[in-house]
Image (cartoon, helix red, strand yellow):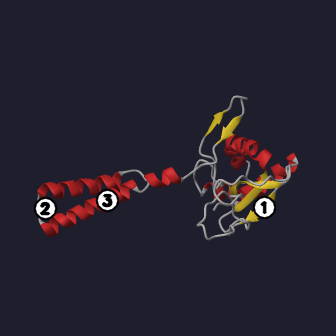
């Protein structure tokens, strides 16, 4: 089951999304059509200061929006037909938007770090389509998260091999291999 709003996947016995509070749909089911021009798609989750600045921009553009407050930020929901253009525009001029904040707000937003400080779920990349428009990826952390487990896994295997060498007397070669795996696992970027 997946949420038609935020696209989160759930176990088959779950019937509604706890974040979006909508009924879930089975995998492969088409998205229900949304009324044109109505906020129905997540633009992103933002630091409250950045969300306030973006609400001013959306109001000036006449873009309808909804806000959902979370513990870690403010989720902005916009019409599906405007989301991609807004995400592309924001990804291009994000540093300028952060620089426009006053000093205290800017340091609070920059404290979060990252390429897009204050944007909690920014796009990871983009490309120019055949019509010359900038298209941004929504970002999928599954591959990145999977690569983060390699270093700790190697370190654990190295420690296990060292312990096996100590208790079972496997020999110096196994001990050197264990030390090598442990060190390599600790030095692999996460």
Q: In this view, does 51 lie above or below 81?
A: below
The residue located at (28%, 57%) in the rendering is 182
Q: Mark 3 points at which residue?
A: 155
Answer with left or right where residue 78 lies relative to residue 119.
right
**Percent position (x, y) of residue 16?**
69, 68
**Gap in angstroms between the C-alphas marked 3 and 1:** 43 Å
In this view, the mark in front (3 or 2): 2
Count the labels in the image.
Answer: 3
Q: Quadrant of the N terminus?
A: bottom right
Answer with left or right where residue 34 lies relative to residue 88.
right
Q: Mark 2 points at which residue?
A: 170
Mark 3 vs 2: CB contact within 8 A: no
Q: Residue 78 or 89: which is nearer the viewer?
A: 78
Label 2: state its secondary structure: loop
Mark 3 vs 1: CB contact within 8 A: no
**Percent position (x, y) of residue 145?**
49, 55
Mark 2 vs 1: CB contact within 8 A: no
Q: Residue 17 or 93: which is nearer the viewer?
A: 17
Label 3: state its secondary structure: helix
Answer with left or right where residue 36 lies relative to residue 24.
right
Q: Name the residue under label 1.
A: 67
């Amino acid at each position: 089951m997946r949420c038609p709003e935020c696209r989160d996947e759930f176990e088959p016995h779950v019937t509604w999304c706890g974040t979006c509070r909508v009924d879930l749909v089975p995998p492969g089911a088409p998205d229900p059509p949304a009324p044109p021009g109505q906020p129905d798609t997540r633009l992103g989750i933002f630091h409250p200061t950045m969300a306030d600045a973006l609400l001013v921009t959306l109001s000036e553009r006449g873009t309808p929006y909804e806000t959902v407050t979370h513990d870690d930020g403010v989720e902005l929901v916009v019409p599906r037909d405007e989301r991609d253009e807004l995400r592309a525009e924001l990804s291009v001029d994000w540093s300028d938007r952060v620089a426009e904040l006053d000093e205290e707000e800017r340091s609070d937003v920059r404290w979060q770090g990252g390429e897009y400080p204050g944007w909690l779920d920014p796009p990871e990349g983009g490309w120019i389509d055949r019509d010359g428009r900038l298209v941004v990826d929504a970002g999928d952390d599954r591959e990145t998260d999977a690569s983060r487990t390699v270093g700790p896994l190697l370190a654990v295997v190295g420690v296990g091999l060292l312990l096996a060498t100590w208790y079972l007397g496997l020999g110096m070669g196994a001990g050197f291999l264990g030390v090598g795996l442990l060190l390599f696992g600790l030095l692999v970027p996460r």
